[in-house]
Amino acid sequence: MGRYIGPVCRLCRREGLKLFLKGRKCSTEKCVFNHRKNPPGPPPRRKPKNSGYTVQLREKQKVKRIYGVLERQFRNYFEKAQRMKGITGENLLVLLERRLDNAVYRAGFASSRAQARNFVSHGHIRVNGKRVDISSYLVEVGDVISVHESLKDNEILKANVEFARGMGLIPDWLDLAEDGTSAKVLKLPTREHVDIPIKEQVIIELYSK
């Protein structure tokens, strides 16, 4: 499956919002967005008018970039959210939050979703003791997410967990073990657990045309 491999700071500038794609660096003064908030490319001759479609497209692109999914997969999530009970927009965000790479990131094992995806794809993550190397795997209540023995003494992992704990970044739907090498899914995430402002309704309007 293809993935974006270009500079990620320009994605934040394009959306006019910090997407925290570089992990801890985004919380420091070194973050490019702190100094360059203008969109990438040459400055427009006149201030562009944002049509309804532009607003919808930008919101969809923002969510895709936050969770690191491409168009086809994102549409599949939308269609699945439509078939679920409840509000489609909220269902869509919950499905994205339940992705294994996002759960690894939320548990504090990784400093960004990109790093979490790297851990998963390289076979460093276990779910209920079994190796799972599919980033889109959806976690369920009761699942125990753990790191492989080879990663338990990794300094990067330890620094990530220490930072997440110190900043209070671990959500209440996950219970991180004392040793910082495993986390249990206590409940499914909800809309309130999405910590970046997203207008999911305009995305639903875009796909419903």
Image: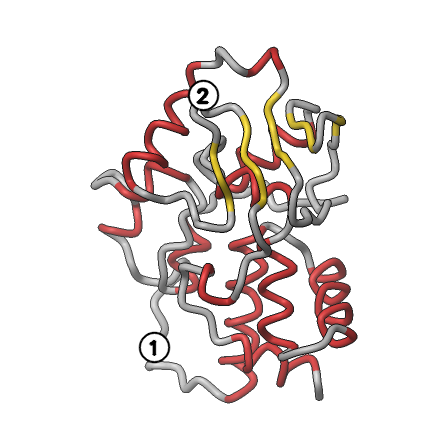
Tell me residue 106's x, y (percent).
48, 43
Tell me residue 159's x, y (percent).
37, 23
Identity of the amino acid at label 1?
Arg
Q: Quadrant of residue 37?
A: bottom left
Tell me residue 78's x, y (percent).
71, 70
Q: From the viewer's perspective, is residue 77 above or below residue 10?
A: below
Q: From the viewer's perspective, is residue 71 above or below residue 150?
A: below
Is residue 54 found left or right of 36 in the rendered image? right
Instruction: Give me the disc on residue 132.
Output: none
Is residue 86 found left or right of 82 in the rendered image? left
Is residue 109 found left or right of 71 in the rendered image? left
Is residue 62 found left or right of 94 in the rendered image? left
Q: Earlier in the sequence, mark 1 or mark 2?
A: 1
Q: Residue at 65% x, 23% y: name it.
A: 124
Instruction: Give me the disc on residue 45.
Output: 1
- How many neighbours does mark 2 have within 10 angstroms: few (below 14), some (14-19), or many (20 or more)? few
